[in-house]
Image (cartoon, helix red, strand yellow):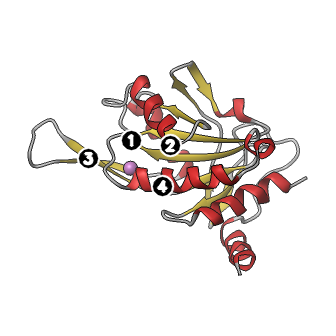
């Protein structure tokens, strides 16, 4: 049953990546109904400049959110970490979670590190300027919007898309996992990519 569901998922979203052997980094995109998604980017983590290219050789789970998110991010990251916890150590070494904060005004590197480490040690928190984040979100088709909160002139929430993007060890965007995808499906998708030649 699960296998069948995954195959359907694969058919739906893993449309042949427009990719050839001589593709340059950054050309590694997924053609989703004519929309080109994915590609390399550079942001920053607490360790300095961070580029997606540094994760070649690993399956990457990419997610856009923010640390003050009341419910969406915590539930997504909980499912993600459940999937990571099911991996054997050898597999885990080939998998990296990447959390991009879309709230750079409030998410400093310390807060980001504390937040992602709370969920799983294989998660890195990265962010950048508003313009840089907007560019990466556009690459992946992620959306977010600041929504003012009534109680305070300074408080806001950030509505955001909650897709988890699975990127192959070659840097190709391969799966779009919708919000609340069960951890067992996330696990299947990770292993599917790990098992590819
Ligand atoms: Ni969130």
Q: Is mark 1 within 8 Å of ligand 1?
A: yes
Residues at circles 2 and 1 in contact by the CB criterion of under 8 Å:
no
Marked residue nearer the N-terminal end (4 or 3): 4
Q: Which residue is mark 4?
A: 76
Q: Is mark 4 within 8 Å of ligand 1?
A: yes
Q: In the image, residue 108 lies at what x, y percent? A: 38, 25
Residue at point 56%, 41% (across, down): 120
Marked residue nearer the N-terminal end (1 or 4): 1
Q: In the image, residue 35 lies at what x, y percent? A: 60, 59
Q: Is mark 2 within 8 Å of ligand 1?
A: no
Q: Which residue is mark 1?
A: 66
Indicate whether 194 appears above or below 97. Answer: below
> Regarding mark 4 in the picture, which secondary structure is present there?
helix
Q: Which residue is mark 3?
A: 157
Q: Is residue 108 left or right of residue 191?
A: left
Mark 3 surroundings within 10 Å by alpha-carbon count, few (fewer than 14), some (14 through 19), many (20 or more): some
C-alpha gap between disc 2 and disc 4: 10 Å
Q: Which residue is mark 2?
A: 119
Is 19 or 71 nearer to us in this picture?
A: 71
Marked residue nearer the N-terminal end (2 or 4): 4
Indicate whether 102 appears above or below 183. Answer: above
Residue 34 seen in the current view? no
> Regarding mark 3 in the picture, which secondary structure is present there?
strand
């Amino acid at each position: 049953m699960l296998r069948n569901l995954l195959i359907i998922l694969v058919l739906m979203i893993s449309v042949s990546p427009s990719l050839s052997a001589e593709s340059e980094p950054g050309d590694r995109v997924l053609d989703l109904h004519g929309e080109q998604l994915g590609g390399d980017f550079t942001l920053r983590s607490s360790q300095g400049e961070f580029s997606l290219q540094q994760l070649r050789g690993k399956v990457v789970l990419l997610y856009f959110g923010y640390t003050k998110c009341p419910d969406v991010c915590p539930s997504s990251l909980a499912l993600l970490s459940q999937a990571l916890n099911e991996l054997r150590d050898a597999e885990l070494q080939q998998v990296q979670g990447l959390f991009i904060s879309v709230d750079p005004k409030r998410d400093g590197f310390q807060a980001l590190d504390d937040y992602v480490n709370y969920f799983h040690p294989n998660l890195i928190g990265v962010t950048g300027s508003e313009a840089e984040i907007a560019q990466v979100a556009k690459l992946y088709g992620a959306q977010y919007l600041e929504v003012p909160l009534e109680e305070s002139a300074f408080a806001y929430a950030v509505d955001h898309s909650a897709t988890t993007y699975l990127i192959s060890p070659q840097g190709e965007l391969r799966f779009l996992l919708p919000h609340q995808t069960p951890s067992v499906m996330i696990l299947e998708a990770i292993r599917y990519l790990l098992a590819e030649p």
